[in-house]
Image (cartoon, grey):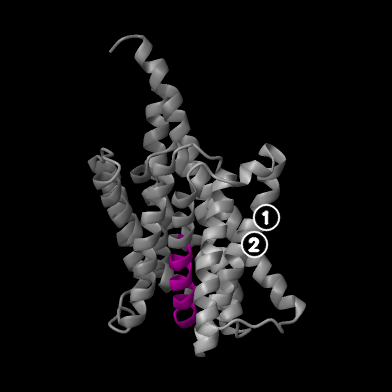
């Protein structure tokens, strides 16, 4: 190895470390949006369709001023418009399926089923992105997945038809993350957020409009909610925008397969939100699973940090 090679590699390793930190923060934030969505659906009776639509409208509205301030009105139009609209549509359908799931399932259980997603992401990163995945990364993903199984304590009822909802979310979200990586840096992260928010809003508006006319309860739209409900809808959208912005930033600088184990961190904030809002306290075995999940992500971080220092 030449003397120039270590100095050339170190910036990339530092970027990977930064990507892991940013992605981990985003993963811890996202379940808070899911908790607000569950509260709206179960306690307040808001349809998952309307919750998801509000989440994407708010994302577009909050992201737009940042883009205009940085690049003017023209910055709102992405260089790859159809690509970004497709990203938004995929994320919108994934979000709708998950909000439907948490209406009928405990939040931690729905997220635990969703945790097949890093495995799907790791496979897609090899097939689509041609990334090299070593045995340590694969092992970290498998350890995290084992922890998720301990948390969920699978049963026949859980893996019935309802469990297909977070499973569908997992598949679509893995596809969305791969598209984030493929999107590169042609557009700013905020421009991509606006485009994805607009694309998701259009898809959900069409679905919710059709559902309202057809009398489908889970897609119906209502406008007569009190200000407190609209405030919670805005809060869900704001949390979703901020969390996914962090995830998008992370995937722009670090390989998808490297970030896969950090998605298991979602169970930590999901468990906390479940306790505070719905009185669900994890058992000792579930805490063991959570420890395995966190440990898998920390192990990958430690490996990358060691490589950067050497």
Residues 172 and 122: in front is 172
Q: In this view, does 216 lie above or below 112?
A: below
Q: Is residue 207 above or below residue 177?
A: below
23 sits left or right of 139 in the view: right
Residue beneath the point at 43% across and 67% down: 111
12 sits left or right of 155 in the view: right
Task: Report the span colored magenta.
Answer: 91-106
SS of the residue at dot 2? helix
Residue reaching furthest right?
227
Q: Mark 1 = which residue?
A: 62
Magenta stretch, main secondary structure, is helix
Q: In this view, does 92 lie above or below 296?
A: below
Q: Mark 2 = which residue?
A: 58
Residues 94 and 166: in front is 94
Crowd rating for badge 2 (residues with CA inside 10 Å; few <14, some 14–19, many 20+):
many
Crowd rating for badge 1 (residues with CA inside 10 Å; few <14, some 14–19, many 20+):
some
Q: Quadrant of residue 51?
A: bottom right
**Residue 104, percent from left and from top:** 46, 82
**Residue 163, percent from left and from top:** 35, 76
Tell me if I can see residue 269 in this picture.
no
Residues 235 and 258: in front is 235
Residue reaching furthest top?
3
SS of the residue at dot 1? helix
Q: Quadrant for the N terminus, please.
A: top left
Residue beneath the point at 69% across and 44% down: 68
Circles 1 and 2, Cβ within 8 Å, touching? The answer is: yes
Q: Quadrant of residue 278?
A: bottom right
């Amino acid at each position: 190895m030449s003397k120039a090679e270590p100095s050339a590699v170190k910036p990339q390793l530092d970027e990977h470390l930064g990507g892991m930190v940013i992605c981990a923060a985003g993963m811890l934030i996202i379940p808070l949006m899911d908790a607000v969505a569950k509260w709206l659906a179960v306690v307040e009776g808001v349809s998952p369709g309307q919750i998801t639509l509000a989440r994407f409208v708010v994302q577009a509205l909050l992201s737009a001023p940042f883009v205009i301030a940085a690049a003017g009105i023209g910055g709102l139009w992405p260089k790859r418009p159809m690509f970004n609209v497709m990203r938004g549509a995929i994320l919108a359908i994934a979000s709708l399926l998950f909000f439907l799931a948490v209406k009928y399932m405990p939040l931690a259980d729905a997220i635990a089923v969703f945790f097949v997603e890093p495995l799907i992401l790791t496979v897609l990163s090899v097939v689509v992105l041609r990334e090299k995945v070593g045995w340590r990364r694969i092992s970290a993903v498998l350890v995290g997945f084992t922890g998720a199984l301990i948390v969920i304590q699978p049963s026949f009822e859980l893996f019935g038809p309802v469990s297909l909802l977070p499973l569908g979310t997992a598949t679509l979200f893995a596809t969305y993350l791969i598209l984030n990586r493929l999107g590169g840096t042609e557009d700013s992260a905020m421009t991509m957020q606006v485009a994805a928010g607009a694309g998701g809003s259009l898809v959900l508006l069409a679905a919710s409009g059709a559902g309202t006319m057809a009398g489908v309860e889970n897609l119906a739209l209502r406008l007569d909610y009190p200000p407190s409900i609209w405030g919670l809808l805005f809060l869900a959208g704001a949390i979703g925008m901020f969390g996914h912005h962090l995830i998008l930033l992370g995937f722009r600088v670090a390989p998808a397969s490297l970030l896969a184990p950090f998605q298991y961190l979602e169970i930590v904030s999901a468990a906390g939100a479940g306790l505070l809002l719905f009185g669900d306290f994890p058992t000792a075995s579930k805490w063991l699973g959570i420890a395995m999940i966190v440990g898998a992500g920390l192990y990958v971080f430690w490996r990358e940090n060691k490589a950067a220092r050497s």
